[in-house]
Image: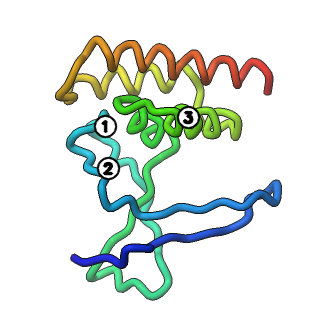
Amino acid sequence: MLFADDLSVAWRDADGRARAVYLDRNYNDTLGLMHEDAYDDATPVEVAGVDPSILQVYVLSPLDLAVSKIARFSAQDRGDIETLARAGLIDAAALHARATEAVGGYVGDLRAVARSIELACKIVEQVSSVR
């Protein structure tokens, strides 16, 4: 399937801040940390103008989205995890459990991903303590 290079959606959140989501054509979920049930637990979404018999669109749960950010764990990924926590969509205990379960299917440096799990959980704990 071929997608437009600029496939994105923009909106204003409940606080009036501008938000956007876009299709990252370079992302490959086989290289990241992903729980084996993430796609089964994803929510189907109807997209205007998209025939669901041709393309089905799903959105990961906030928890699985956070887990998917742990392996790379860039500054942007940390910020995304913080945003999910600030919105009350994830908590540290659930993130730790889900990410730890996901490690069984991870191909990469397990020590690095274990450190990233701990750091991600600390970010969520810090945000949760001030909410």
Residue 26 lies, in percent from the top left, at 30, 55
Please identify, in this view, whether the residue under mark 2 or under mark 3 is nearer the observer.
Answer: 3
Marking on residue 81: 3
**Circle 1 residue:** 34
Q: What residue lies at 28% left-to-right and 82% top-to-bottom?
A: 53
Along the viewing direction, whichever of 54 and 119 lies nearer the viewer: 119
Tell me which label, 1 or 2, sits earlier in the chain: 1
Residue 51 lies, in percent from the top left, at 35, 85
Q: What residue lies at 40% left-to-right and 13% top-to-bottom?
A: 115
Asked if residue 14 lies left or right of residue 32, the reply is: right
Q: Which amino acid, by three-letter code, is at mark 3?
A: Ile
The local secondary structure at tag 2 comes to loop
**Circle 2 residue:** 40
Tell me which label, 2 or 3, sits earlier in the chain: 2
**Is 59 situated above or below 121?**
below
The local secondary structure at tag 1 comes to loop
Q: CA distance from mark 3 to mark 1?
A: 15 Å
Instruction: Specify few, some or many for label 1: CA neighbours under 10 Å numbering under 14, 14-19, or 20 or more.
Output: many
Quadrant assignment, res 127: top right
Instruction: Specify few, some or many for label 3: CA neighbours under 10 Å numbering under 14, 14-19, or 20 or more.
Output: many
Along the viewing direction, whichever of 8 and 38 lies nearer the viewer: 8
Q: Which amino acid, by three-letter code, is at mark 2?
A: Asp
Question: Which quadrant would the N terminus be assigned to in this image?
Answer: bottom left
Tell me which label, 3 or 1, sits earlier in the chain: 1
**Is 39 situated above or below 92?**
below
Quadrant assignment, res 34: top left
Q: What residue lies at 28% left-to-right and 37% top-to-bottom?
A: 32
Q: What residue lies at 32% left-to-right and 50% top-to-bottom?
A: 39
Please identify, in this view, whether the residue under mark 3 or under mark 1 is nearer the observer.
Answer: 3
**Is 88 situated above or below 101?**
below
The local secondary structure at tag 3 comes to helix
